Image (spheres, helix red, strand yellow):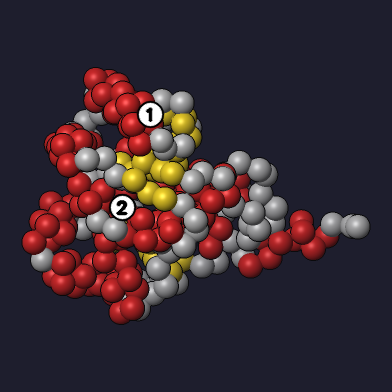
């Protein structure tokens, strides 16, 4: 069985969520066994500071984590947060392990669902940077961020509440209202929960009448699929239509 290495702590609540979701998903694959997971927990405050003022140092910080995971025997790695993907390409070029991108799996799911214009929510670093839009464009999907004032508001709630493990009903209601307003103003047909704490606040598949792409769920599904033995890997994407394994596909009659 492959071993996954998780760059965790970014933040703690979502890292716990990843761990629980991977275990729950694996139980459906093989109830008699458990997946092999190595977690290296980083300091989310330090990481956010480096995103803001020193991207080369951020790469080194994340790279050190990946080397620790490789040393612990991981076969591939994933970062349990969206914002660090701002340096994904530079990191992947130097990583000792293959990296599984949360942005790629989200863009692929958007295309599969036929979504074309997506609202992006997350930290201000995620919303303001082009990395989501650049990847999504390869899948024929347009990613739209809120304006500066809305970005500041979302970021303040994200960092001041969600990363601290505080999930308030009034914050949930305000974000739903924001999506409802921008759905009409910006003509979006879906919303990316582009921060892995957001699915802990917004637990429904639909927000303000549009599909919500739970990036944690999509990333976990891809991680679990990579952990499977090759003949048991999923052929279709993780959400929506039932998954088909390689063994199921090969055994079908015509």
Residue drawn at (41%, 47%), measured in percent from left and top?
215
The label number, if any, that marks residue 81 in the structure image: 2
Q: Nearer the viewer, residue 22 or 166?
A: 166
Whole-percent x, y for residue 131 in the image: 32, 60
Q: Residues within 10 Å of mark 1 (few under 14, many from 20)?
A: few
Q: Is residue 24 left or right of residue 125?
A: right
Residue 184: assigned label: 1
* Quadrant into which the C terminus falls: bottom right
Q: Position of residue 244 (x, y in %)?
A: 70, 53
- Quarter of the picture containing the N terminus is bottom right
Viewer-side residue, 140 vs 32: 140
Q: Depth check: 107 or 203 in front? A: 107
The image quarter containing residue 42 is: bottom left
Q: Residue at x 36, y 56 (%)?
A: 133
Is 59 situated above or below 192? Answer: below
Question: Can you name the residue that lies furthest to the right here?
Answer: 254
Q: What residue do we see at 54% from left, 51% from top?
A: 111
Of labels 1 and 2, earlier in sequence is 2
Give the vertical position of 205 relative to 98 (above or below): above
Seen in the picture, residue 62 relative to 225 is either above or below; the reply is below
Whether tag 1 and tag 2 are in contact, CB under 8 A, the answer is no
Q: Is residue 49 visible?
A: yes
Mark 1: which secondary structure?
helix
Q: Quadrant of residue 64?
A: bottom left
Question: In the image, residue 107 lies at what x, y percent?
Answer: 46, 54
Q: Marks 1 and 2: which is nearer the front?
A: 1
Residue 36 in view here: no
Q: Please determine whether, in this image, residue 158 is positioned above or below residue 184.
A: below
């Amino acid at each position: 069985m492959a071993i996954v290495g998780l760059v965790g702590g970014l933040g703690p609540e979502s890292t716990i969520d990843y761990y629980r979701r991977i275990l729950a998903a694996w139980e459906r694959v093989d109830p008699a066994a458990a997946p092999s997971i190595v977690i290296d927990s980083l300091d989310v405050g330090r990481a956010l500071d480096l995103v803001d003022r020193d991207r080369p140092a951020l790469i080194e910080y994340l790279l050190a984590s990946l080397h620790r995971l490789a040393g612990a025997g991981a076969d591939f790695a994933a970062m349990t947060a969206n914002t660090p993907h701002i340096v994904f390409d530079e990191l992947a070029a130097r990583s000792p392990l293959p990296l599984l991108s949360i942005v790629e799996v989200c863009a692929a799911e958007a295309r599969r669902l036929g979504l074309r214009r997506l609202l992006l929510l997350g930290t201000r670093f995620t919303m303001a940077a082009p990395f989501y839009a650049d990847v999504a464009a390869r899948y024929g999907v347009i990613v739209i961020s809120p304006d500066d004032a809305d970005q500041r508001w979302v970021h303040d709630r994200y960092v001041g509440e969600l990363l601290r493990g505080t999930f308030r009903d009034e914050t949930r209601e305000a974000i739903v209202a924001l999506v409802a307003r921008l759905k009409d103003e910006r003509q979006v047909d879906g919303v990316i929960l582009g921060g892995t704490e957001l699915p802990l606040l917004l637990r429904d598949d639909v927000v303000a009448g549009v599909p919500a792409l739970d990036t944690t769920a999509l990333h976990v599904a891809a991680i679990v699929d990579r952990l499977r033995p090759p003949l048991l890997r999923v052929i279709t994407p993780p959400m929506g239509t039932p998954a088909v394994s390689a063994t199921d596909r090969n055994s079908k009659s015509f």
